[in-house]
Amino acid sequence: MRHKTDWFALLAGLLFIGIGVRYLLRPQPDTLVMGLLLVFGLGFAGLVGVMARTMRRR
């Protein structure tokens, strides 16, 4: 049985992996920039997730 891709979970996971790699490469990044990146990245992932769910129902 195949299941549909959860785009929000996929993009949010990639975002957190990217942030983790960023902290490993340079231990002291700007926290304001990283916080904004996290908020906007999760917002974008949520938007993509909602759009994918809407398209799937059609």
Image (cartoon, helix red, strand yellow):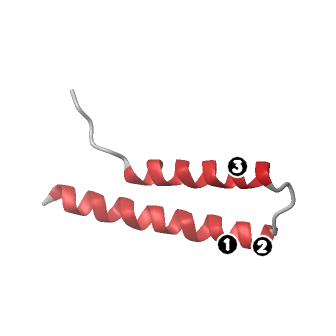
Q: Label 3 is placed on what type of residue?
A: Gly
Q: Earlier in the sequence, mark 1 or mark 3?
A: 3
Circle 1 or circle 3, nearest the eye = 3
Q: Label 2 is placed on what type of residue?
A: Leu
Question: Residue at coordinates 85% horizontally, 54% vertically from top-left?
Answer: 27
Q: Nearer the viewer, residue 30 or 45?
A: 30
Quadrant location, the N terminus: top left
What residue is pinned by disc 2?
Answer: 32
* Residue 20 image label: 3
Give me the C-alpha separation between circle 2 and circle 1: 6 Å
Q: Nearer the viewer, residue 45 or 20?
A: 20
Residue 21 in the image: state x and y as whole percent.
69, 49
Direction left: furthest residue: 58
Give me the C-alpha separation between circle 2 and circle 3: 16 Å
Residue 37 in the image: state x and y as whole percent.
64, 69
Direction top: furthest residue: 1
What residue is pinned by disc 1?
Answer: 36
Where on the picture, by quarter, is residue 50?
bottom left
Secondary structure found at label 2: helix
Whether pointer 2 and pointer 1 mark residues with C-beta atoms closer than 8 Å, the reply is yes
Q: Nearer the viewer, residue 25 or 39?
A: 25
49 sits to left or right of 14: left
